[in-house]
Amino acid sequence: MATGATPSTRDSWATHAGFLLAAVGSAVGLGNMWRFSYIASQGGGAAFIIAYLVLVAVIGIPLMTSEFIVGRMTQVSPAKALRELGGTAWSPLGWLFVFCGFGILSYYSVIAGWTMRYAIVAIGTGIPAETGEYFGEVSQGTDALIGHLVFIALTVFVVVGGVKHGIERAAVILMPVLFLLLIGLAVWAFTLPGSREGYSNYLDPSFGELFNRRILTDAAGQAFFSLSLGMGALMTYASYIRDKRDLGREATIVATCDFGVAFLAGLVVFPIIFSFGLTDQVGESSVGALFISLPAGFSSMGVAGKIVGTTFFIMLLFAALTSSISLLEVVVAAFIDGLGWTRKKATITLGAVAAALGIPSAYSTNFLGAADAVIGNFLLIVGGLLTSIFVGYVILPKADAELAQGLESPLFRKGWAIMVRYVVPLILAVVCFFLIAPTWAAIQTMFGAGG
Ligand code: PHE
């Protein structure tokens, strides 16, 4: 393992809390605000949330722990770690991670670009009352492209600074502010006249849905995306951990915070939608709630709306930035470790590549949605399936020994091994199978009719 930068020259986290905040920052992102409440309201409310929590416990936490183990054990980027531990047969999985990093960043930053525009417009002139029309204008085309490019530049700016001085510093500043803003918004939303109706619509349990195949695939896809699993983001972050802390505990904390934020975001979004009678746009698309309904609510509230709207989009922007830096870091770390590039060269070059790859998404929301279905949903699950096979069958004794260092609960260790070996691969194989047809349709949209 003495390849590349020696452990002493390789960057690492300055503080224990720094790693945790960065990992929570990666997990908490647009997915929590943009996808979670939408999917919950579409697919069974509280029933969806229960299915989601079960999957987080049974798949999410064991897999996240596995990513942490591989990262800390090898102290190198995922592509290199997989090769060192499993031989060249496992390198392609590392490159799949890099592909997903590029792919998700390319469209994620388009949505983050919209967010940035909304935050700026909300502070200035205020978001136009015709929010549907406005969103149509700025979500595709030159406006969207500019937002995308500016946001990528912001991401590059943070990642160039390195682990301690870039990523950790950003997370330590932005994450506490994000939590405070979100709690403030939830309290405010509680005071709205339609909040009751909003809550019950969000959480209305249709338990018949619980055994519906779509709930399983939706919840699994959402869990992977939201927890930043299946593409080496948290593996990369864990490769900068030096001490023997309890990795099971860290994974549980990250997953709990991520769920907490997603749940809370729903408690903000739904009261607003119901108080202002904006339910009709929500069903159309997952972005409808965030970029059409909510701003319509804000703009009908005068000065208060301006303050709340600005707060909301700034919070969303912070969430997006602490996630996009983890996406770029996966790619950057792979090129630093694999090709010996300097951080500066890797960050700027690869940021430019991601910027170019995002152009189709900036010009077509159809393309964006399809890219999300293929990369942000299907490929993450494939990556997670392969990771569980790798950890559960190729390196289990080593991984188990690494987990044991610093672990407080022996029960967790036993449960983890059973999950990674049997439960996770089985469930993910079933989910993959169910996703083949919709993924194929999305690929056709990307390269065929959609364009
Ligand atoms: N977890 C992030 C979100 O919810 C997205 C993400 C996915 C980030 C995969 C990194 C890796 O927005």
Image (cartoon, rainbow, N blue to C red):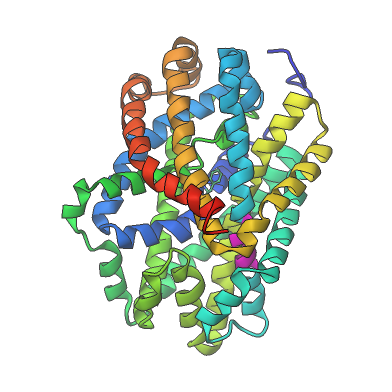
**64 or 241: nearer the eye?**
64
Q: How many marks?
A: 0
Q: Which residues are magenta?
A: 109-116
The question of residue 268 being in magenta is answered with no
Q: Is residue 304 above or below residue 368?
A: below
Give residue 14's position: percent from left, percent from top.
69, 35
Q: Residue furthest left?
A: 208
| Residue 246 appears in view | no
Image side of residue 1 versus residue 275, left or right: right
Classify residue 335 by image quadrant.
top right
- Residue 277 position, x and y percent, is 35, 82
For the point 66% across and 46% down, the residue is 325
Q: Position of residue 82 (x, y in %)?
A: 58, 20
* Residue 181 against residue 9 in the figure, above or below: below
Residue 72 visible in the picture: yes
User: Relative to the observer, which residue lies in front, 141 or 65?
Assistant: 141
- Looking at the image, residue 142 lies above or below residue 78: below
The reply, left or right, for residue 268 in relation to residue 12 is left
